[in-house]
Image: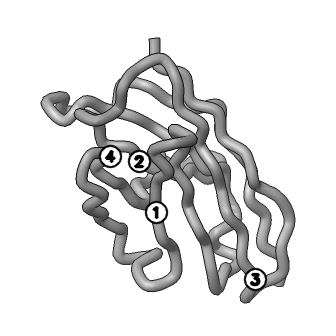
Amino acid sequence: QVQLVESGGGLVQAGGSLRLSCAASGRTFSNYYMGWFRQAPGKEREFVARIRWSVGTTYYADSVKGRFTISRDNAKNTVYLQMNSLKPEDTVVYYCAAREISSASYESWGQGTQVTVSS
């Protein structure tokens, strides 16, 4: 069973940076996409970024392109989301997720970590 545990959220001023971590366990993730999503209260969950674990290829939502970077550390089985130039509208809960490459949707989710950006 896949387990995902996020950490690294917190309070930061606008223009600042945070790095989120997602510790993954329970599988060998070579055939997985790992993704970051975010969700504001009362809104649908929004895709942020994903990385294909085996080759490291990445894809970003337009809203974060150029500011956020997703990466992974194979030795630590951890996925990161480096967030720079943070804006107040980035204030939401961020979730880590995993799906097999052959799957149409993300099957496993972390518990989420809150990011708050003050203006």
Residue beneath disc 4: 53
Mark nearer the N terminus (1 vs 2): 2
Q: Which amino acid, mark 1?
A: Ile
74 displayed left or right of 89? left
Q: In which quadrant of the rendered image does the N terminus lie?
A: top left
In whole angstroms, how far apart are the C-alphas of marks 3 and 2? 22 Å
Q: Residue at x 78, y 72 (%)?
A: 117
Mark nearer the N terminus (4 vs 3): 3
28 displayed left or right of 100? right
- Return the residue found at the far top: 1
In whole angstroms, how far apart are the C-alphas of marks 3 and 1? 17 Å
Q: Residues within 10 Å of mark 1 (few under 14, many from 20)?
A: many
Residue beneath disc 3: 16
Residue beneath disc 2: 35
57 displayed left or right of 41? left
Residue 105: image tag: none
Residue beneath disc 1: 70
Mark nearer the N terminus (4 vs 2): 2
Q: How many marks?
A: 4
Q: In which quadrant of the rendered image does the C terminus lie?
A: bottom right
Q: 63 above or below 75?
A: below
In this rendered view, identify the residue nearer to me: 8 or 43. 8
| Residue 103, x across and y down, in percent | 18, 28
In this rendered view, identify the residue nearer to me: 93 or 4. 4
